[in-house]
Image: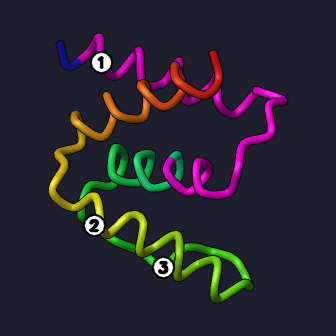
């Protein structure tokens, strides 16, 4: 399942990156957090950018997913794409 999940995740990520649908900030934050957990796990890093408050929200959203494995986060990311973009 690992390789199939990776392909499905990459396809979902590509689809999400290329959509013209405007999503609410809270949903975008979910996308960010699940993507980071799926690709970095619990190896946290400070989000890039100059807006400190926004970066704090992003890091907090990611930290809240520390109970998920990378594969679980990939599945949740795919679910978000299917729920909000398809």
Q: For label 3, count other residues whose C-alpha is less than 10 Å away and answer few (under 14), some (14-19) or many (20+).
A: few
Question: Which mark identifies residue 43?
Answer: 2
The tag earlier along the polypeptide, 2 or 1, is 1
Q: Disc 3, disc 2: CB below 8 Å?
A: no
- Name the residue at 31% across, 69% down: 63
Q: Residues within 10 Å of mark 1 (few under 14, many from 20)?
A: some
Query: Mark 3: which secondary structure?
Result: loop
Give the Cα separation between the discs numbered 3 and 2: 10 Å
Residue under label 1, please give it.
5
Whether residue 24 is situated above or below residue 77 in the rendered picture = below
Calculate the distance from the C-alpha at mark 3 to the C-alpha at mark 1. Answer: 27 Å
Given residues 75 and 48, the one toward you in this image is 75
Residue underneath mark 3: 46
Q: Earlier in the sequence, mark 3 or mark 1?
A: 1
Q: Is residue 29 magenta?
A: yes
Q: Residue at x 53, y 18 (%)?
A: 11
For the residue pair 66 and 43, the one nearer the viewer reads as 66
Question: Of helix, strand and loop, which one carries label 1?
Answer: helix
Judge the density around disc 2: few (<14), some (14-19), many (≥20) Cα neighbours within 10 Å. few
Q: Is residue 61 left or right of residue 48?
A: left
Magenta-drawn segment:
3-30
The C terminus is located in which quarter?
top right
């Amino acid at each position: 399942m690992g390789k199939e999940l990776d392909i499905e995740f990459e396809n979902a990520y590509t689809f999400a990156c290329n959509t013209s649908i405007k999503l609410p900030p809270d949903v975008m934050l979910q996308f960010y957090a699940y993507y980071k957990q799926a690709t970095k796990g619990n190896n946290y890093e400070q989000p890039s950018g100059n807006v400190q408050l926004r970066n704090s929200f992003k890091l907090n959203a990611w930290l809240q997913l520390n109970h998920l494995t990378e594969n679980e986060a990939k599945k949740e990311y795919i679910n978000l794409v299917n729920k909000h973009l398809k």
